[in-house]
Image (spheres, rainbow, N blue to C red):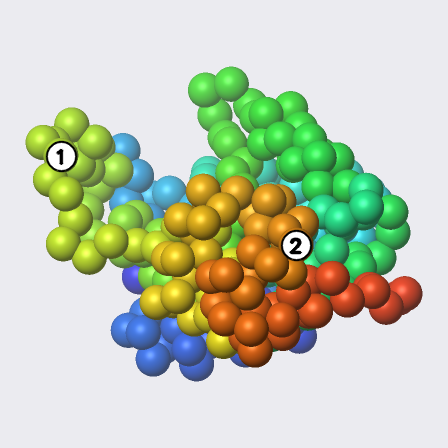
């Protein structure tokens, strides 16, 4: 127990060094399912296999439409691990009935295939709820906006499962105390990536649009100028309204 295995395949192997830098005992390995796996401390200290499948938003759409995720990868995850997560990485939005990924500088890029945000959410809910084995295993989804968020989640997940036994976690019944450092909202994380905004000015944008991303993306130029000034407001508006370009169970020994 203790080692976190990262699949040696291209697309996941680059996680090893960042995880090691964050203090995790990560090493490359070959797995029949998932990109990251480790053994945790389950109920009363029983060994519990934890697995994570990583997906960029564009990869997720493709794997849903081809059937690879629901028919092949998800069943393998549930068979190989006691607890499994699909981590979806990347900001996204729906525009004109189509799904777009949101990249650096606010650039939007259409995902392959024709899928709406609602369809994506429904398909992922079907995976989470429809494939759940009552009393046994669950497939969970975690949405993150960047690779940094992915690494942060993996560190938290690993620490949660290895620091103490599953039944020893009692924070859910503790007395609530306001955090000393407030984590910014999903709205602010998204708009902070737009040029000239950043984390600090994202608060003004959130207050103006009341935390509604759809309202922010559909806002007229005058709104953006009012919040950010003529130069930055115009630049952000042009970016948001630019025409898009076409475009078998794992052995316990494998974790030791």
Q: Quadrant of the C terminus?
A: bottom left
Residue at 36% across, 77% down? 20
The Cα atoms of the two marked residues, 1 and 2, are separated by 41 Å
212 or 116: which is nearer to us?
212
CA neighbours of label 1 inside 10 A, class few (<14), some (14 to 19), many (20+): few
The picture places residue 27, in percent across and down from the top left corner, at 44, 74
Where is residue 46? Give x, y as percent.
Answer: 29, 39
- Name the one closer to the observer, 88 or 184: 184
Q: Which corner quadrant of the image does residue 247 belong to?
A: bottom right
Residue 230 point in image, percent of width and height? 56, 73
Q: Which residue is mark 2?
A: 220
Q: Is residue 146 above or below residue 135?
A: below
Q: Which residue is mark 1?
A: 176
Q: Secondary structure at mark 1?
A: loop
The circle on residue 11 is none
- The residue located at (60%, 59%) in the rendering is 222
The answer to whether residue 101 is seen in the rendering is yes
Between 209 and 119, which is closer to the camera in this rendering?
A: 209
Relative image position of residue 57 (x, y in whole percent): 67, 56
Mark before the other along the chain sequence, 1 or 2: 1
Figure quadrant of the N terminus: bottom left
């Amino acid at each position: 127990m203790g080692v976190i295995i990262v699949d040696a395949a291209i697309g996941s192997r680059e996680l090893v060094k960042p995880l090691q830098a964050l203090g995790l005992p990560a090493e490359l390995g070959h797995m029949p399912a998932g990109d990251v796996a480790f053994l945790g401390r389950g109920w009363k200290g029983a060994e519990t296999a934890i697995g994570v499948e990583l997906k960029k938003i564009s990869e997720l759409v493709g794997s849903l439409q081809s059937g690879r995720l629901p028919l092949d990868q998800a069943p393998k995850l549930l068979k190989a691990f006691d607890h499994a997560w699909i981590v979806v990485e990347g900001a996204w939005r729906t525009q004109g009935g189509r799904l777009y990924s949101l990249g650096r500088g606010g650039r939007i890029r259409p995902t392959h295939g024709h899928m709406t945000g609602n369809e994506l959410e429904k398909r992922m809910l079907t995976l989470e709820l429809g494939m759940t084995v009552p009393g046994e295993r669950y497939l969970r989804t975690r949405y993150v906006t960047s690779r940094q968020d992915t690494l942060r989640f993996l560190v938290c997940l690993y620490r949660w499962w290895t620091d103490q036994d599953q039944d020893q976690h009692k924070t859910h019944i503790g007395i609530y105390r306001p955090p000393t450092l407030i984590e910014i909202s999903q709205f602010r994380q998204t708009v902070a990536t737009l040029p000239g905004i950043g984390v600090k000015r994202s608060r003004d944008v959130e207050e103006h649009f009341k935390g509604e991303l759809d309202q922010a993306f559909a806002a007229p130029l005058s709104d953006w100028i009012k919040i950010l000034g003529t130069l930055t407001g115009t630049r952000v508006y042009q970016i948001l309204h630019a025409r898009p370009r076409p475009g078998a169970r794992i052995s316990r020994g494998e974790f030791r």
